[in-house]
Image (cartoon, coloured by chain):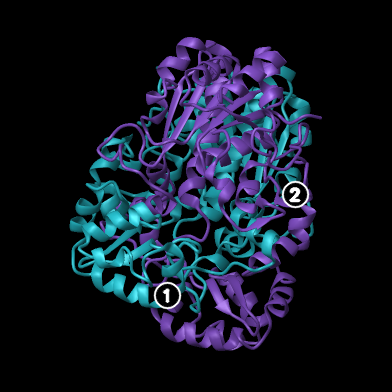
Chain colours: A purple, B cyan
């Protein structure tokens, strides 16, 4: 059974992360994703290390399953070809800086005239409107300006970023949602539209709870380490061999934990007996808990507490994640086939459909590997046409 | 012009964050979202502080624009009503623990028989399959088990969480994308389907780059503070009055930075002149940069560097975010109308559609405020019917 987007054609422009990741999500769901790249060079992400068998692991991880078409966008004929491709496409995704596609003559206004059904999404650092719209940005800028960095990390320590590139990926996820909503709308109106996604906007949207607290109280939320600001225990503790997340703030959970841990005395303790008491005496509570939790391994604790229905889990490093039996059982680590390098591991998709499951089986394309295939199948070009384009450096 | 999902009916079950946030995204785009809640109590998120004018800011921030219908799911008649509502709905979202909806007789199998067109998405900690499927989870568990915590924070310091609840919100965003892909597929097949979203899966998917590096090298990525592992400067630095994100690792950017900062001598410096040299002598580089960056305020630095086209930005706290002129210009802070409390501020949507823009103008519903409206308009119940249901404690 093909994925839910089987038959949908996507054109993807841009480099690195936000646009390509969104396009990959559509491709995972069965869309035919054509990645347009500069001849000879391609997406700069192809040069991002580490490489294995000559393939950038970075590029592979966000471009699996796509088709690569080279077009030299500085050439008139290449831009005309893009116009014709856009005439066949359902969705165009791009993550250039605002203005770049317009300067190339490939802005929404132009392509919409050629294909009124085209859904065109632009992802940029700050969006197309507002005072910062011309400023460049990368993930860290969006994380910093959008508020995430200010609430991440330990109090009284330097700011830290979230470990994955959520400044980019947040924009990818809102963009994928938005283009599919526009696709639904098109099924009734027959018309496409333009979607303007700003990485900074997306960070503000994800800071909803911190903003809500600020609106309600006027207090500025700060970083809280691994703690929940209102509940305890609801955080990370050290163990004999690593770290564990433990959630046991409700009275019943706390009682269960104390019994499992051999600390029955804490159940009715004046300092530790209630969530409020523990918050009030937090420093002392933390010292005692740290000492207690360090007496057993993470696995011993999770086995003990899990059997009693408590919410807990190891802090897994990346090796533990990819080897985790549950992660494996959920097909979150899959192998894809690369023409030259054979089978390569990538992360799977979390979008599990019962009737039209995603199929992830192809690796990332070599640069321009599908130029002929796509220009023939979408535009009916002949071998002669393609040889001419190649001679002129258009593809 | 209505939003792109105008006319789509969504039923939302569950509490707190992941399901309700996904449902809110659909509502922001024009869908009619009916939140089904327990009579008298409602979603526990209504009790999450801080409160203002008796309204939970937490509840408001993820339930604006929805309609609240109370149904006592322990009563047979209530469950039959849910079946009839599902018969009218396009999408059902729920984030109970696996098995809860089944036990209520409201699992996908049952509701699909009543409405083969229904798209039904279940968000849970670990999904419906795999060894952990019965385990409970909250945001911190997903962040910890899914790998994010292990790559967030400072090296040689305790693990920290990402400051917002991306364990939940990541699942919301993959769920919103997936249900809309299924909606597209339904427009051709006429059939709905079930979507199984696991919070842990979503974290693994977002760790794509860390996993890719591990697959390529076998090295386990660790936390990197605010640094990029391969490029420098590409991180946060302290200033006279706060922190700044600065990206200037390419030779041209570095030259521009050195000139702007009055450090021309660093351009060809043996230790600092190239990205590789700076990485090799990172400790010394960091000391010198910290001293330099502390000589000016964040605003002075961003004005100076921004004028030269360098990528930089302040580390904004939440107050600075919501007051930022760009955030305001992008309508990322909007006011919604609450029946009792008047106008309240919430965060806007980052999904900006050119032809069918989102409209965010209503606050969160009081508990059960739309029971009569929805049961009359979706199911043609009469006032007598409703009085009967109310007398029996069904609604």
Secondary element at tag 2: loop
Q: Position of residue A197 (x, y in %)?
A: 43, 35
Q: Position of residue A333 (x, y in %)?
A: 74, 53
Residue located 59% across and 70% down the image: A245
With B142 as the anchor, is A327 left or right in this view? right
Residue nearest the viewer, comparing B264 with B64: B264
In this view, A334 is above or below B1: below
The numbered mark at residue B128 is 2
Q: Residue under mark 2: which chain is it in?
A: B
Residue located 55% across and 49% down the image: B170
In this view, A23 is above or below B6: below
Give whichever of discs 1 and 2 has the lower sequence position.
Answer: 2
How far, Cα to Cα, is label 1 from label 2? Answer: 49 Å
Q: Which image quarter is the N terminus of chain B in?
A: top left
Residue located 38% across and 46% down the image: A137
**Residue B363 in sight from this viewpoint:** yes
């Amino acid at each position: 059974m093909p994925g839910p987007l089987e038959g949908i054609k996507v054109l993807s422009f841009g480099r690195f992360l936000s646009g390509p990741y969104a396009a990959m999500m559509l491709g995972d769901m069965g869309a035919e994703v054509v990645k347009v790249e500069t001849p000879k060079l391609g997406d700069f992400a192809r040069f991002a290390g580490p490489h294995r068998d000559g393939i950038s692991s970075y590029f592979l991880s966000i471009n699996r399953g796509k088709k690569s078409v080279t077009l030299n966008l500085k050439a008139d004929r290449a831009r005309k070809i893009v116009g014709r491709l856009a005439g066949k496409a359902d969705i165009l995704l791009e993550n250039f800086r605002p203005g770049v596609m317009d300067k190339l003559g490939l802005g929404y206004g132009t392509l919409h005239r050629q294909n009124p059904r085209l859904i065109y999404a632009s992802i940029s650092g700050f969006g197309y409107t507002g005072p910062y719209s011309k400023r460049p940005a990368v993930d860290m800028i969006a994380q910093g300006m959008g508020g995430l960095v200010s609430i991440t990390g330990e109090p009284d320590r330097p700011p830290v970023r979230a470990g994955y590139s959520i400044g980019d990926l947040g924009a990818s996820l809102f963009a994928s949602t938005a283009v599919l909503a526009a696709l639904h709308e098109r099924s009734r109106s027959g018309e496409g539209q333009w979607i303007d996604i700003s990485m900074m906007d997306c960070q503000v949207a994800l800071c909803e709870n911190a903003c809500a607290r600020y609106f309600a109280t006027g207090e500025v939320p700060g970083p809280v380490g691994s703690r929940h600001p209102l509940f305890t225990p609801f955080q990370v503790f050290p163990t004999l061999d690593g770290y564990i997340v433990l959630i046991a703030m409700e009275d019943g959970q706390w009682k269960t934990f104390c019994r499992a841990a051999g600390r029955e005395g804490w159940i009715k303790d004046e300092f530790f007996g209630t969530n409020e008491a523990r918050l009030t005496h937090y420093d002392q509570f933390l010292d005692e808990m740290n000492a207690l939790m360090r007496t057993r391994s993470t696995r011993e604790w999770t086995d003990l507490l899990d059997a009693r229905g408590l919410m807990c889990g190891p802090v897994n490093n990346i090796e533990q994640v990819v080897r985790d039996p549950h992660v494996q059982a959920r097909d979150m680590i899959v192998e894809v086939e690369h023409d030259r390098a054979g089978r390569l591991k990538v992360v799977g998709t979390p979008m599990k459909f019962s009737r039209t499951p995603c199929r992830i089986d192809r690796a990332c394309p070599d640069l321009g590997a599908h130029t002929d295939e796509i220009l023939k199948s979408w535009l009916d070009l002949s071998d002669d046409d393609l040889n001419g384009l190649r001679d002129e450096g258009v593809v």
